[in-house]
């Protein structure tokens, strides 16, 4: 079989991989981009992750004409149109570069320098490269619950965003960040949503006052949460599915139309042949990398979700910057430079956080003061009243000695934007007093910082 050589081979069309491929291609390097599915050009984010889910959030939050089912169907159709257009643009971004070749097929290492790409039953192509970058992302985890995998009513997050019908009764296994986001979306569309989780609280890693506020918002939207629920069986019944679980020392059953498994994602390494490449993995199944994202093979890098880091598209983009600096820069950037990674859960209103929780700060023995305020009580934030979204809570954990912000939890309208300001301030050592006394535009959500940070410590 003929072998084609490239300067750079990228496996996976995700955010970091496509950006790196474009950068190297524009420099005249011969680049191969291998993606296993034409439906995934552009990666998880635009096709089955951030973009479609946030599009559904947008539609769910806005009342429209027609029945709940018609509203949902319109949202799905418009979301499909959006992701289709973005997928085409992402493909064109690389295809227009003469030195970049996009190859659709499954990649598997034959040895550390050679990758075989297969498409269908007979098409095969062997590629070699000086530099290989693995960017295959992550896939949903299905817990080993009897009957779950076999259920015709089982949905993953990928499935749920693309179904045409609105489930009348939706059961969600897992009350973490993904489960909460989907619960909020589908409750607003009109589904009767029930979340089940072994933990006592939703988003259990967050502080209790935050999860209490979020739980109140979800319950107000009609979501039922069953804490301490250990699911023991799933079985299909007439026109639905029956979920058996144990809670409070008793066995219970719950009937639903569909069941969403929102129990996490794991690095997508199956079929890559990493053993043949001599690429080591961690006990959790991620590709092992160092601070510059090199694997156990110095010419092979792993970026994005597959390397076991935070599963966010903006982390994948930053991974690209680190690898690019190794290949064409000064080789100074590393994951050690990455401070105060932030995240947002797009429930309604959105929840965004950066830095330490209050619990984490106290467990580290830090001397802290906590300021917090309900959004409805923030007089200097009229935007919340203007847009009719006054639910939520803002909380800051501040170092008592240095006056630096150690962490922030914002459950409020526009929190996904405000958290970027707070994180930037934290990275550059801006004190809580400086954030408090800064001039912000009016009316904006950010000006809430003037009032919240001026309040007396609650603890």
Image: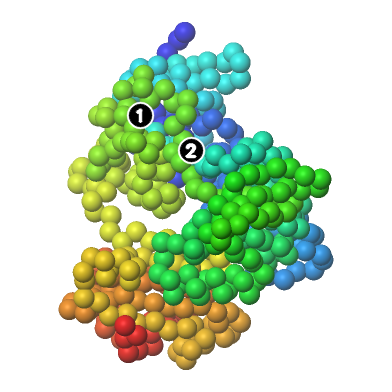
Q: Which residue is mark 2?
A: 13
Badge 1, how many Cα within 10 Å: few under 14, some, many 20+? many
Of helix, strand and loop, which one carries label 2? loop
Q: Residue at x 48, y 59 (%)?
A: 199
In the rendered view of the protein, which quadrant contains the C terminus?
Answer: bottom left
Most foreground residue, 301 or 349: 349
Image point 21% across, 69% down: which residue?
365
According to the picture, the residue beneath numbered tag 1 turns out to be 132
Residue 1: horizontal and vertical position, in percent?
47, 8
217 vs 32, left or right, is: right
Q: Is residue 297 above or below residue 364?
A: above
Evaluate whether residue 233 shows in this view. Answer: yes
Say what secondary structure mark 1 lies in.
Answer: strand
In the image, is residue 1 above or below residue 24?
above
Q: Nearer the viewer, residue 411 or 30?
A: 411
In the rendered image, residue 350, in percent from the top left (x then y), is placed at 52, 68
Q: For this view, does 405 lie left or right of residue 9?
A: left
**Residue 15 - label:** none
Q: From this viewpoint, which residue is outermost toward the bottom? A: 379
Q: Quadrant of residue 434?
A: bottom left
Cβ atoms at labels 1 and 2 below 8 Å apart = no
Task: Estimate the spatial distance between the alpha carbons at disc 1 and disc 2, rounded to whole Å.
Answer: 13 Å
Q: How is the image coloured?
A: rainbow
């Amino acid at each position: 079989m003929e072998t084609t050589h490239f300067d750079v081979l990228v496996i996976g069309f995700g955010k970091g991989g496509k950006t790196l491929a474009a950068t190297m291609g524009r420099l005249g390097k011969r680049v191969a981009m291998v993606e296993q599915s034409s439906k995934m050009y552009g990666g998880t984010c635009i096709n089955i992750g951030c973009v479609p889910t946030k599009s559904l959030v947008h539609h769910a939050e806005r009342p429209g004409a027609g029945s709940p089912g018609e509203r949902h169907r319109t949202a799905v159709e418009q979301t499909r149109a959006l992701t289709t257009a973005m997928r085409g643009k992402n493909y064109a971004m690389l295809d227009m570069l003469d030195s970049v070749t996009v190859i659709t097929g499954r990649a598997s290492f034959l040895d550390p320098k050679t990758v075989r790409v297969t498409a269908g039953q007979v098409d095969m192509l062997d590629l070699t490269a000086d530099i290989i970058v693995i960017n295959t992302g992550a896939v949903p985890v299905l817990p080993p619950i009897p009957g779950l995998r076999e259920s015709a009513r089982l949905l993953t997050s990928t499935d749920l965003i693309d179904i045409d019908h609105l489930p009348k009764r939706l059961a969600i296994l897992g009350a973490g960040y993904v489960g909460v986001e989907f619960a909020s979306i589908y409750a607003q569309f009109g589904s009767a949503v029930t979340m089940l989780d072994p933990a006592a609280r939703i988003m259990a890693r967050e502080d209790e006052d935050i999860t209490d506020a979020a739980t109140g918002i979800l319950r107000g939207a009609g979501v039922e949460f069953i804490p301490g629920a250990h699911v023991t069986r799933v079985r299909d019944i007439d026109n639905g599915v029956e979920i058996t679980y144990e809670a409070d020392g008793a066995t219970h059953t719950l009937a639903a139309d569909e069941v969403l498994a929102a129990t996490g994602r794991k690095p997508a390494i199956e079929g890559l042949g990493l053993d043949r490449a001599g690429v080591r993995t961690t006990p959790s199944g991620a590709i092992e990398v160092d601070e510059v994202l090199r694997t156990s093979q110095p010419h092979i890098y792993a970026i994005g979700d597959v390397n076991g880091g935070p599963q966010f598209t903006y982390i994948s983009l930053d991974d690209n910057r680190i690898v690019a600096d190794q290949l064409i820069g000064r080789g100074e950037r590393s994951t050690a430079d990455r401070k105060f990674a932030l995240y947002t859960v797009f429930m309604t209103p959105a929840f965004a956080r950066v830095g330490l929780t209050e619990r984490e700060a106290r467990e580290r023995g830090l001397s802290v003061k906590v300021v917090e305020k309900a959004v409805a009580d923030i007089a200097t934030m009229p935007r919340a009243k203007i847009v009719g979204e006054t639910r939520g809570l803002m909380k800051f954990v501040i170092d008592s000695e240095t006056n630096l912000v150690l962490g922030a939890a914002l459950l409020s309208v526009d929190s996904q934007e405000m958290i970027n300001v707070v994180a930037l301030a934290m990275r550059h050592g801006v004190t809580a007093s400086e954030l408090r006394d800064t001039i912000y535009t009016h009316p904006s959500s950010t000006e809430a910082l003037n009032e919240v940070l001026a309040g007396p410590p609650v603890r």
